[in-house]
Amino acid sequence: MRMLNRILVLTGAGVSAESGIPTFRGKDGYWRNLDPAKLATPEAFARDPGLVWEWYRERRRRIRNAQPNPAHQAIGKLAQHAHEFLLVTQNVDDLHARAGSPKEKMVQIHGDIFVTRCSRCDFQFRDTGRGGSPEPPAPLPAERGRLESIASTSSGEREEEDIDLPRCPRCSVLMRPGVVWFGEQLPWDELRRVENYLEAGPCDFVIVAGTTATFGYIIDWALRARANDGKLIEVNPEETPLSQFATQQVRESAAMALPRIVDQLIT
Ligand code: OAD
């Protein structure tokens, strides 16, 4: 086994497709005939928070019941064979983490679906619904009662049904899923982590898998990381705006291609 020097991996919904999580722009992406691109917006939440919450609860359930696939596992393995490694995923599911990608080497640039956060202040908690307590970031003592009551009902589905629309215990306004919606800023701290990694030097290999690369920053990060000499490998059954820059285009599913690519890189 060889140790690689510096790697950046960028992933999108296609990597979780083979775990049964619908992609955004794919044919299964619609929910009740509603376009995810219209539901995942601040405007949709302002208009009908109940509907938006229902969609996210349904997605949370699906993710909870899904298992990581060989693509997630291959990326987790690659992380162990590089001196420096960063995975930047646009996916809000936890499948990369469950496949062993370490938290400190992963950025969820579009947020985390299991986080519920206040629409106004910085109160938030994370609950995967798999038992155990929610993980609040440093709650104030006064909030403990509320969190314990969430914890005591947090056995998966029941919690979802019991809580109507969650309200912030600090300021009473509606809480929302901890994800980035269309038109919103990317989370500053996570953005900083990506920038720090890019500024620290070029990568030998950049792998971009399962994303339409719709957002300019995905292409920008891939090209900056690869710099002059790095290899840029795209894994996607379809052509994307990034394809023209790839040194290798792999037109296969991520679960098929990534285990092979990773094994080739590390042996
Ligand atoms: P999309 O749904 O736009 O694209 C999924 C991509 O995965 C497509 O390019 C498919 O060709 C490819 N794909 C499908 N099945 C695949 C498979 N088995 N293996 C490999 N590739 C496969 O998802 P994203 O590009 O991730 O953002 O979307 C980016 C962002 O747009 C999302 O994070 C979300 C969305 O709107 C926000 O909500 C802010």
Image (cartoon, rainbow, N blue to C red):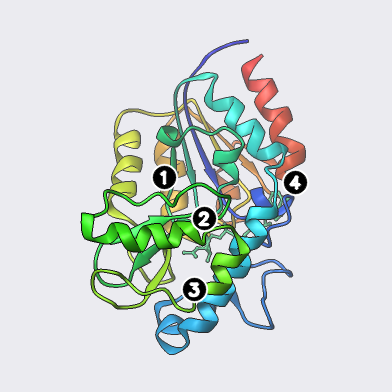
Q: Where does label 4 land, which residue? A: 253
Q: Residue 151 falls in which quadrant of the image?
A: bottom left
Closest to the camera, between mark 1 and mark 3, is: 3
In three-dimensional space, the C-alpha distance between marks 3 and 2, rounded to whole angstroms, equals 21 Å
Closest to the camera, between mark 3 and mark 4, is: 3
- Confirm or reject: label 2 Cβ below 8 Å from ligand 1: yes
Which residue: 31% across, 71% down? 168
Q: Earlier in the sequence, mark 3 or mark 2?
A: 2
In three-dimensional space, the C-alpha distance between marks 1 and 4, rounded to whole angstroms, equals 22 Å
Residue 207, numbered label? none
Closest to the camera, between mark 1 and mark 4, is: 4
Query: Disc 2 residue type?
Result: Val
Q: Where does label 3 land, which residue? A: 163
Q: Where does label 1 land, which residue? A: 221
Q: Earlier in the sequence, mark 1 or mark 2?
A: 2
Element class at badge 2: loop
Q: Position of residue 53 (x, y in %)?
A: 51, 75
Query: Disc 4 residue type?
Result: Ser
Q: Is residue 64 left or right of residue 53?
A: right
Q: Earlier in the sequence, mark 2 or mark 4?
A: 2
